[in-house]
Structure formats: C-alpha cells, structure tokens
Amino acid sequence: MSIVIDKSKCIGCKRCRNVCPGSLIKTDENGKAYIKYPKDCWGCTSCIKECPAYAINFFLGSDIGGMGSKVHTEKNGDILSWLIEKPHGEVIKIDINQKESNKY
C-alpha cells in the first residue's frame, strides 16, 4: 500500500507533510511534496484527506483487491467524496455526509 503524489497538482501547502504520522512526506527544493520511501507508507490516508489540491492518490494494489486502482478524496461543504479510479478509466464515487456521520 502506498500513496502517489502528483507534483504537477501540488500547491506546496505542506498539509500532507504535517499530518503524516510516519513523517514520510518531504518537500523538494520547489516546495512540492513527495514520499521518500513509498514502501513504508502505512496507508492511513490522512494526507489524502488533507490535500486541498487533490494531488495525492492512494494506490490500491492487487494484494488488497484494487487491481491497480487509485483513490483520492474531494470535499464540498459537509460532503467528503471518495473517488476510485479504475485502471480502465471507470470512476466510482462514494459520498459521505460528514455532518451526518458525526451524529453517532
């Protein structure tokens, strides 16, 4: 399990770096995020949820049934959307109303 950071989308806010529990995310000379040791990623997805530019994807390998799919989040108000991009182009969207889920 690992994340993939798209440097072309990264805005250099460092939110991913600050939230990574393993201190695995670093920034380059241009302030763009990268993961130094992808194999050490715990797969907690904290960085994905923090990234306002949607520059981070979680790689869903075949070992967990993802067959090469990638997942990222997008936030719109109280709605947190998880988008799963399959290798052949299909996108599955799962919406979670965070306001509703905090009631429990």
Image (cartoon, helix red, strand yellow):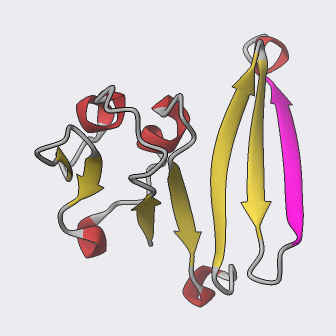
> Magenta part mainly helix, strand or loop?
strand
Q: Is residue 78 above or below residue 71?
A: above
Residue at image point 51% right, 43% down: 48
Q: Position of residue 35 (x, y in %)?
A: 26, 59
Magenta part of the chain: 90-97
Left or right: 11 with respect to 61? left
Front position in the image: 87 or 103 = 87
Residue at image point 47% right, 30% down: 50
Task: Identify the image quadrant of the N terminus.
Answer: bottom left
Number of marks in picture: 0
Front position in the image: 32 or 21 = 32
Residue at image point 74% right, 81% down: 87
Which residue sits furthest left? 29
Left or right: 16 with respect to 75? left
Left or right: 32 with respect to 70? left
Quadrant housing residue 2: bottom left
